[in-house]
Amino acid sequence: MISKRVIASGDVQGVYYRDTCRSTAVRHGVRGWVRNLPDGSVEALFEGEPEAVERLVEWAHEGSPAAFVDDVQIFEQEPGGLEGFEVRPTPTPRR
């Protein structure tokens, strides 16, 4: 079991990136979440079998058919025992 957090930037909001990410993750048995960030990027956490997580990391570089991904940052993390895959709300910026 591995866990990776990714941040994709470019034209990734308003182009079904999150929903396509969710359905792709479910299809590959990957657990985690995805959300828009206030700066226009999208953040996702993928957790599962190494091969399945790597497929999602590769997918993040392409995104949904309408997306244009400029860059993807990848961060390895300790698995947290997540269940399912959800689209989370955009976090509120701190003041």
Image: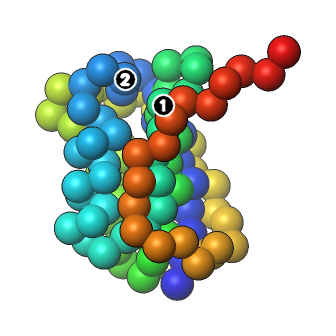
The three-letter amino acid code for the residue at tag 1 is Asn
> Mark 1 Cα within 10 Å, few/some/many (few <14, many 20+)?
many
Q: Which residue is drawn at 48% across and 31% down?
A: 36
Q: Residues within 10 Å of mark 2 (few under 14, many from 20)?
A: some
- Quarter of the image that includes the C terminus: top right
Q: Position of residue 67 (x, y in %)?
A: 26, 27
Q: Which residue lies furthest to the right in this view?
A: 95
Residue 92 coordinates in the image, percent (x, y): 67, 24
Label count reads 2
Q: Can residue 54 be seen in this view?
A: no
- Please name the residue that numbered disc 2 is placed on: 13
Query: In the image, residue 74 lies at what x, y percent?
Result: 57, 51
According to the picture, the residue beneath numbered tag 1 turns out to be 36
CB within 8 Å, label 2 to label 1: yes
Please say if 73 is above or below 75: above
**Residue under the point 24% across and 57% down:** 24
Question: Residue 63 falls in which quadrant of the image?
Answer: top left
Residue nearest the viewer, comparing 47 with 94: 94
Kindly state the secondary structure of the residue where label 1 is placed. strand
Q: Position of residue 21 (x, y in %)?
A: 31, 49
Identify the secondary structure beneath mark 2: loop
